[in-house]
Image (cartoon, rainbow, N blue to C red):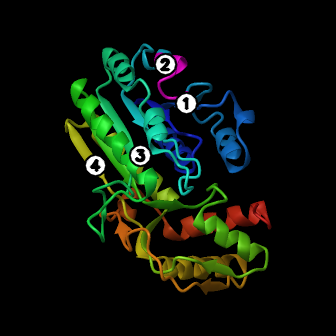
């Protein structure tokens, strides 16, 4: 298939593009910045890592003039995989869901019209378990954080315009991926940084039940969903792959156990007493992947995390 992919500089986006390309699809990945030099840290490494894997198109934010020209390219596309989302520090008090919605859906009708004119009939939108109504858990499944609100509104916009333009819509809902090349601000990167610095890691919200999934497994699930949906006939389909749906304290112990035997570090943990719950206590995805069918090895996935951490050396930051 010929796929137009947005959001490839993100942690999960890099893995999704590599897996799509590995399975033989022709992928054009768009980026907001003018080149690799426009990124820093892990994001820069991810963008560089995609060189030779896909067709990289820089200075092409979603809905921009260059992006619209790409959408109108002939021969046309088999699918638009819209993975990009304005996230930034999505837990910051100043996160603006309205600005995120505007960036995520800029000139959406025009984009779909141009792609539809070229024969494209399928969209695959990346959703989040933090959206209103997604997953299963406590408190009636509200949107979690303003980021969850932005993703909810983005999904609603895509549902509306996909129907308006008579295009089929697939939604791939992700929980909390972890693995090599993740951003340093993420939970498991924090754990590794503390341990490689010889320090104990404090789990500040141990009683939240969340859904952490190996990024390599998530990427296989994504590519499988894209293939099945785009080649099928359903007007709408969704996937909600789940990993380790458990308390963050239990996941931290699991992660420590796997890293301890691979990195030969104590991997010490401390658990704060959680007394406040501004977010719902539990929120997880609902679909259990089949590792054998996807040819995924859990051991190899843990090995890859330890190998990448060792390669970067302490401190990770």
- Whichever of callouts 2 and 3 sits on the residue coming sooner in the sequence is 2
Gap in angstroms between the C-alphas marked 1 and 3: 21 Å
Instruction: Give left or right: position of 251 versus 267.
Output: left
Residue 311, horizontal then vertical, whole percent: 76, 61
| Disc on res. 75 | none
Q: Quadrant of the N terminus?
A: top left
Residue 66, horizontal then vertical, whole percent: 54, 18
Gap in angstroms between the C-alphas marked 2 and 3: 26 Å
Give the magenta range. Answer: 61-68
Gap in angstroms between the C-alphas marked 2 and 4: 26 Å
- Whichever of callouts 1 and 4 sits on the residue coming sooner in the sequence is 1
**Disc 4 packing (10 Å; few <14; some 14–19; many ≥20):** some
Q: Which element carries disc 3, helix, strand or loop?
A: helix
Residue at numbered disc 1: 30
Q: Which element carries disc 1, helix, strand or loop?
A: strand
Q: Which element carries disc 4, helix, strand or loop?
A: strand
Q: Nearer the viewer, mark 2 or mark 3?
A: 3
Residue at 24 percent across and 45 percent down: it is: 237
Q: Which element carries disc 2, helix, strand or loop?
A: helix
Residue at 70 percent across and 43 percent down: it is: 44
Gap in angstroms between the C-alphas marked 3 and 4: 19 Å
- 301 above or below 47? below
Residue 155, horizontal then vertical, whole percent: 33, 42
Residue at numbered disc 3: 150
Residue at numbered disc 2: 70
Residue at numbered disc 4: 238
Q: Name the residue nearer the viewer: 210 or 299.
A: 210
CB contact under 8 Å: marks 2 and 1: yes
- Find out whether residue 163 is within the magenta segment: no
**Disc 1 packing (10 Å; few <14; some 14–19; many ≥20):** many
- 206 above or below 62? below
């Amino acid at each position: 298939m010929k796929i137009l992919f947005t959001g490839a500089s993100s942690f999960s986006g890099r893995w999704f593009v590599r897996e799509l390309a590995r399975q033989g699809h022709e992928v054009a990945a768009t980026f907001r910045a003018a080149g690799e030099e426009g990124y820093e840290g892990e994001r820069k490494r991810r963008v560089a890592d995609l060189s030779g894997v896909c067709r990289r198109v820089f200075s092409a934010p979603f809905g921009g003039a260059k992006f619209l020209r790409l959408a109108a390219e002939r021969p046309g596309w088999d699918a638009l995989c819209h993975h990009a989302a304005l996230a930034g520090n999505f837990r910051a008090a100043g996160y603006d869901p309205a600005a995120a919605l505007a960036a995520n859906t800029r000139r959406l009708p025009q984009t779909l019209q141009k792609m539809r004119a070229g024969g494209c009939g399928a969209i695959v939108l990346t959703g989040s378990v933090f959206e209103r109504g997604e997953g299963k858990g406590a408190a009636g499944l509200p949107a979690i954080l303003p980021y969850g609100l932005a993703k909810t509104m983005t999904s609603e916009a895509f549902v509306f315009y996909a129907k308006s333009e008579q295009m089929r819509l697939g939604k791939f809902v992700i929980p909390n991926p972890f693995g090599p090349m993740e951003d340093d601000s993420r939970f498991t990167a924090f754990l590794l940084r503390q341990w490689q610095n010889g320090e104990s890691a404090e789990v500040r919200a141990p009683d939240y039940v969340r859904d952490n999934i190996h990024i390599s497994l998530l990427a296989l699930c994504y590519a499988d969903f894209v293939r099945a949906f785009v080649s099928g006939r359903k007007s709408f389909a969704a996937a909600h792959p789940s990993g380790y749906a458990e308390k963050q304290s239990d996941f931290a112990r699991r992660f420590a156990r796997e890293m301890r035997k691979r990195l030969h570090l104590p991997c010490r943990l401390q658990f704060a007493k959680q007394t406040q719950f501004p977010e719902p206590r539990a929120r997880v995805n609902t679909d259990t992947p089949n590792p054998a069918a996807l040819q995924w090895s859990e051991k190899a996935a843990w090995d890859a995390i330890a190998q990448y951490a060792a390669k970067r050396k302490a401190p990770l930051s």
